[in-house]
Amino acid sequence: MKLTIAPEVQKTLAAGGPVVALESTVIAHGLPRPRNLEVAHAMEADIRALGAIPATIAIHDGNAIVGAGDVLLARLASDGRVAKVSLRDLGPILAARTLGATTVAATVDIAARARVQVLATGGIGGVHRGGEHSLDESADLEAIARNPVCVVSSGAKLVLDLALTLERLETLGVPVIGYGTDEFPAFYVRSSGMRVMHRVNDALGAARIAKEQLARGAGMLLAVPVPAEASLDHDEVESEVMRAIGAAERAGIRGAELTPFLLRALGEATQGRALEANVALLRANARVAAQLALALCV
Ligand code: PSU
Ligand code: MN
């Protein structure tokens, strides 16, 4: 795989400085236009404001790009044909030399090759509801287990089966660390009622664990709850999730299209409040990731 690392990112990495990787599926397929591009820029600005360097990862012209520039970001946000690139798609999309937006799984794979240690996203993929029958489990989980990258997210997307997702993370040996919480966050909702085994209260505590875990050649999940003022009500979202899952089943939506479909349906059902929660948690996670990247440098 040919890595094209932006000069600024390369320079920072060579000096042992703080870099935060960002995925691009959330830009191309997770958020509606034109908000998606605004959020991509806002996350990068949030990271810079704290003194770290952002590196948005994507596939372009047969290269794995680490540190997409503004022109590429704009294309990812506006071109309707951008492929959603998970692990299984990396080889084919690189070979086709087409434009691809990387999921957490593919982003973690590329970040590890570039030696970027921290990645910020909204909510990772996981085991879908009914996953015990469909075997629909995001490649995100195994990718985090296999690569020395700390993923900062608000848990897993609440359209998933969060209990099964935690079970799989345990089996895969991925530590889930609550950031200022004892509970696994549920994406747009602060609490899921499910406990996590480990907790830290600041970036320094997270960095201490990350140093040990990444040195093992394996990753971890730092779980940051959505900011309280943006959190949605659990019961309200839950009934909308059930409705969205029903609509997906009737429309025959599955596989890679399922996650974007469900997120879109939730956005519409909540008159945009889900979108506001998504934006708030993405930016909060970008800031925590920047602080963690800085703490890893000392
Ligand atoms: N988080 C968001 N919005 C998203 C995603 C995460 O707030 O769109 C994307 C991530 O790229 C994640 C992917 O890796 O959804 C999971 O898709 P799947 O369940 O098909 O593996
Ligand atoms: Mn899937």
Image (cartoon, rainbow, N blue to C red):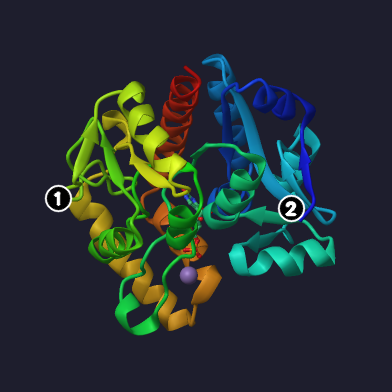
Q: Is residue 151 visible?
A: no
Q: At 31% from the left edge and 62% from the top edge, which residue is drawn?
A: 165
- Whether label 2 lies within 8 Å of ligand 1 gets the answer no
Q: Which residue is mark 1?
A: 193
Q: Position of residue 114 (x, y in %)?
A: 66, 41
Name which quarter of the figure residue 233 lies in: top left
**Amino acid under disc 1:** Gly
Q: Check disc 2 and report its element: helix, strand or loop.
A: strand
- Whether label 1 lies within 8 Å of ligand 1 gets the answer no
Taking 282 as reference, is 262 above or below it? Answer: below
Q: Check disc 1 and report its element: helix, strand or loop.
A: loop
Q: Is residue 15 visible?
A: yes
Please indicate whether residue 141 sits to the left or right of residue 64 in the image.
left
Q: Position of residue 193 (x, y in %)?
A: 14, 50
Give the number of the disc on residue 59: 2
Q: At 76% from the left edge and 56% from the top edge, which residue is drawn?
A: 1
| Distance from the alpha carbon under mark 2 to that under mark 1 | 37 Å
In this view, the mark in front (2 or 1): 2
**Amino acid under disc 2:** Ile
Q: Position of residue 132 (x, y in %)?
A: 30, 79
Taking 65 as reference, is 249 above or below it? Answer: below
